[in-house]
Image: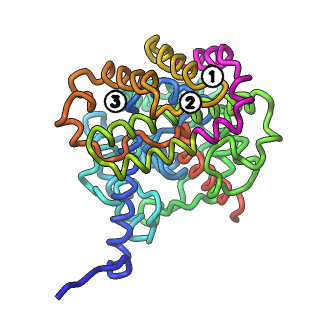
Amino acid sequence: MESSLSWLDFSEDDRRKMTEVISLFKLRETRDELGLGSIRNAFADLLFPGTTTLQTRARYFLFVPWIYKELERKRVPSAKIQDRLRYEEIRIIRILKTAGETDGVIGAISGASLTRFPSSIYWLGLQRWGIFRHAITQSQYHRSLDRRYMEMREQRTTDDGEPLDWGRDEPWDPDLPEAPNGFLEDATLTLRKVEAEYLYEKLRIHCDRSMLPFLIEAGDRLDQVKFAWMHPSYASFPAWLRETLHHARLFSEAMYGAALLYNFMLAQLDGRSERADEYRAELQSWRGELQARRGEFLAWDQQRFWQLIGRHGLIPIPTRQFVDAWLRLILETSETPRVEDSESARGLVRRRETYLKRGRSRFTSKRHRELWGGASGSFQLDFRWWVARRLANDIIEGLRGE
């Protein structure tokens, strides 16, 4: 007897786990197949400093310092801090799951076998947002704790008995909100209003030349906004931010064609005619979009684009050469070319991927081509917008609370 299972035949917990697994596969498929990561990261750091693709929810920016401060209060020595930190972070996973949190719990699937913990994922963000005040690595901080405890035992005061240089070496922001009583027994991912106000203030002070504080200031949830340059308040953003978004958009849309072409060529080479037809249709749609806005692309100040990016990231010369060659190919004719039928475009993409991967190139190695899932790096660059959007939504919701 044949049987079939529908989505509803699975338990809520199983559905959640499968959704997370699917999300992980999607994340894995956004790999940088054509070596555009340096430009992508420069834009992402410029627009959304302190973010990474592994961040999920804003309250982890508070969970991590709260856990550290509690361990420091107990004078956990340097030799044991890593194990104790790991224990508490695993504990947070269990507590959040028990509380019914299903969206954005880091380690919800892996549990104790998690390889990247929130303290590591958020460390640079904590520094960039001014929550952790020392420019050192996480391991350096761990090693410094024994010395810090010894210094804290030494009473340094003025002649009047007042503390000397109070707070000078305090690693954590003194304005950090106090952790709720028993937060390690009753944690949630929902920000209290005081916590949301604090994070917003940190963004205003330390990330004022980025898009992040403007997302909060606009006050609108961003679930349906696909890209940063589609924000409903775009027209009210300052000129420097609109310029950055303008360059980011044109670069993202122009290079999207190269990503589609790469996958189209692999589909052809692998004999997946149906998949190739799908990519051909997507390339046709991409070509129509570029043609409809061709005047904007032709007026694009590419020299200014490279100046802007060059100030915020180190771009390898071969990467710039590839991008320049692609832009010339698609913009120097009266109409956007059919790149899927252009030997120049196909050769450019093939040479770029082969240069990056050498013997692992999918164009030359059948074994590596067999690992291709049918879509690799085939998404339009959004420069961590989906991460920033979720963090901003958390803060916006928190500001609306009590």
Give the image quarter of residue 367. Answer: top left
Look at the numbered disc 3 and give the secondary structure of its residue. Answer: helix
**Local crowd at mark 3 within 10 Å, few (<14), some, or many (≥20)?**
few
Look at the numbered disc 1 and give the secondary structure of its residue. Answer: loop
Relative to 64, residue 322 above or below: above
The numbered disc on residue 337 is 2
User: Which residue occupies the extreme right position in the image?
Assistant: 236
The answer to whether marks 1 and 2 mark residues whose Cβ atoms lie closer than 8 Å is yes
Residue 216 placement, left or right of 366: right
Q: Is residue 229 magenta?
A: no
Magenta residues?
287-313
Residue 350 in view here = yes
Q: Given the image, on which type of amino acid does mark 2 rest?
A: Pro
Whole-angstrom CA distance, mark 1 to mark 3, is 54 Å
The answer to whether marks 3 and 2 mark residues whose Cβ atoms lie closer than 8 Å is no
**Local crowd at mark 1 within 10 Å, few (<14), some, or many (≥20)?**
few
Q: Give percent across and percent down for residue 243.
A: 73, 28
